[in-house]
Amino acid sequence: MFKIGNVQINNPVVLAPMAGVCNSAFRLTVKEFGAGLVCAEMVSDKAILFNNPKTMGMLYIDEREKPLSLQIFGGEKETLVQAAKYVDQHTNADIIDINMGCPVPKITKCDAGAKWLLDPNKIYDMVAAVVDAVEKPVTVKMRIGWDENHIYAVENAQAVERAGGQAVAVHGRTRVQMYEGKADWNVIKQVKEAVRIPVIGNGDVQTPQDAKRMLEQTGVDGVMIGRAALGNPWMIYRTVRYLKTGELIPEPSVREKIEVCILHLDRLIALKNEYIAVKEMRKHAAWYLKGIRGNAKVRNAINECQTRDELVTLLMSFVEEVEAKEQHVVIES
């Protein structure tokens, strides 16, 4: 357990804020699998100020998700502060997170996301301005640096702390690495040793054992899980359980996976409408099917589905097909 400001986080397993993924339907599903903290996908400060309908929808939080961190991004102090004030006063988020890790060119070109990594003074200035303007705790998610020649993770984290930031999450890759190569846990460890605020480590946590190793090797307060949770909320549950008891519980059955996939779909439909939800759910369904033998045909067919009933029928037929094969193998053996 650790605290971010006055917000109690009951276990060290944190869902990363993934763009295009971490809407309320996904977050609630992951939360029910035991995450100590879930993070919403990043939203643009200017889009909040322009009252963009899609963006305003992204600010929706189900009370059952809490504690929740809502992430904003921007490159200019004035608009970032105004957006943070809006989140502070008009949403039920517990924590306001500032993105300074997004490596995508359209974000960095606006002096936002990972572009901040090159200037600890700007980080101090921006974070201090937001902290002064809001009541909720302010945190930052960052990468270790821009490239291997500009790794200012320690200075940047110290700037966040000096500015009044209440925690920092550190992804162990540079901006240039994007999502490739290996995450550098040594730099995460250096950050943890350099600041007194909680540090959450991120990068290359694929299994519960990885999470334990990160905690032991770096001393971080929390472990942030991103891509390993896609279509696999059991990764969160199995990690929480493993860290607490040392027990590595088995992977779910195919039926369990698909039943949760359908629950996720129904939540997405309630959140967005059937047409949009089914289109969005295609990628999630493919993630839920990952690692199941013989899934290629059904993964291709998913992309043709237009309605909930089509998608559910397709997925449940696949479950029955897999179970029939398993039963056949048991009988033969």
Image (spheres, helix red, strand yellow):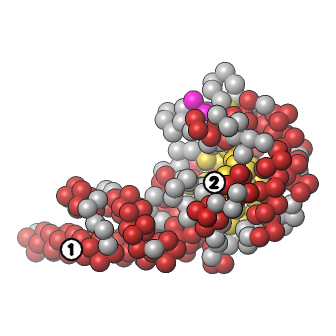
Q: Secondary structure at mark 2?
A: loop
Q: Is residue 62 magenta?
A: no
Q: Give the Cα distance between marks 1 and 2.
A: 36 Å
Kind of residue indicated by mark 1: Ser
Tell me if label 1 and label 2 are in contact, CB under 8 Å.
Answer: no
Task: Compare residues 40 and 204 and report the one nearer the observer.
Answer: 40
Residue 255 in view here: no
- Residue 287: x and y in percent read 38, 58
The residue positioned farthest toward the top in the image shown: 149
Start-end of magenta stretch: 172-176
Query: Tag on residue 42?
Result: 2
| Picture residue at 51% right of the left edge, 58% below the top | 21
* Amino acid at dot 2: Met
- Displayed quadrant of residue 50: bottom right
Q: Is residue 118 left or right of residue 124?
A: left
**Viewer-nearest residue: 262 or 185:** 262
